[in-house]
Amino acid sequence: MPMIDLSERIAGGLLGVAAGDALGATLEFMRPNEIRDKHGVHREIIGGGTFGWRPGQGTDDTDLTWAVLASYLDGPYTLDRVAANMLDWYHTPPRDIGGTTNIALGRLEESGDPHACGRTGEYSNGNGSLMRCIPTTLARSDAEVRRAELIEISAITHAHRRSIDSCVAYGEMINALLEGADPSEAIAAAQALDLRPLVREALEVDPSEPVEDLSTSAYVIDSLKCAVWALQQDDTFEETLVALVNRGRDADTTGAVAGGLLGVWHGVGAIPSRWLETLEYRPRFQAAVPTLVALRREAP
Ligand code: ADP
Ligand code: MG
């Protein structure tokens, strides 16, 4: 296998999120049999779906990933910058937004305090913070800094420990892959953390489980589980992502979360170029890579 360098892994992570989001957006809310009837096997980025997306357009997943990423570019990171970027997106206004994200950003707008608006209820554990969390890990090699920023960014909207721990576990896997770990080492790195039981269970998904048995719901635990499953498939970036998004339901976010992890592991070179060419965020994400490489190499 050819060596994949840090830039290619970072670019793969960002563009993997964008590709999974754009591929899945067509299928959001659909059932697998409806998808089969309408598309056969869906494997091209064609837009459409419930919200009428342009081919390669980012949905909330990629928009908010950009909001977080932009907070690390052009000046020092602060949580207030993340919050301001999220509010700018909130005012666009977005075509599609999760319930928890919507309530929390409404509260943020009123209070101006990103520490006081996150939701903590049991049913505030959608995948809305996991789907946007990758930039922090791409920028931060120091474990303490990375975890602290993952936690505070999740908590702007998703402050329940299960959502927060899902971001921290995902970050630990991404970080390990960036440092040269293989998938089983990356999963073990996350398992070594003190995590809530359901997050730990998601990391223990059996990779031989048929894709039909996975749930592509918008529950954070399901999305994390799908991503960990995907990381362990002995198949290409394309085939693994296609298998997951064709399960429908929250196909775009399931694709985004798995796409980020797969993109870091396989590198940007493994993402089909016909997909990359459609992605509206591609220029901005590519342009951010050298800054992320530099941030990652900075002493903490
Ligand atoms: P977001 O996380 O993007 O803001 P929502 O708040 O709408 O989005 O959550 C998405 C979905 O996550 C909800 O429709 C719900 O089905 C699911 N969800 C949230 N918490 C739980 C939970 N504790 N158990 C099962 N499903 C959950
Ligand atoms: Mg989306």
Image (cartoon, rainbow, N blue to C red):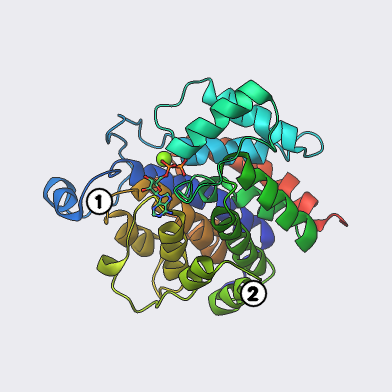
Structural crowding at the residue carrying mark 2, measured as other residues with C-alpha within 10 Å and reported as few (<14), some (14–19) or many (≥20): some
User: Looking at the image, in which quadrant does ligand 2 appear?
Assistant: top left
Which one is closest to the eye, mark 2 or mark 1?
A: 2
Residue drawn at (60%, 40%), measured in percent from left and top? 118
Instruction: Name the outermost residue toward the left.
Output: 37
Residue 177 appears in the rendering? yes
Quarter-of-image position of residue 76:
top right
What kind of residue is marked 1? Answer: His
Quarter-of-image position of residue 54:
top left
Residue drawn at (65%, 71%), measured in percent from left and top? 194
Give SS at disc 2. helix
The answer to which of marks 2 and 1 sits earlier in the sequence is 1
Q: Which quadrant, please, contains the N terminus?
A: bottom right
Q: Is residue 72 left or right of residue 45?
A: right
Give SS at disc 1. loop
In the picture of the structure, the residue carrying the numbered disc 2 is 189
Q: How many numbered marks are there?
A: 2
| Nearer-the-camera pick, 55 or 144 | 144
* Mark seen at residue 42: 1
Q: Is residue 209 left or right of residue 137?
A: left
How far separated are the C-alphas under marks 2 and 1? 34 Å
Instruction: Name the outermost residue toward the front.
Output: 121
Location of residue 158 in the rendering, given as x and y in whole percent from the top left corner? 56, 45
Taking 99 as reference, is 300 above or below it? below
Location of residue 274 in the rendering, given as x and y in whole percent from the top left corner? 39, 47
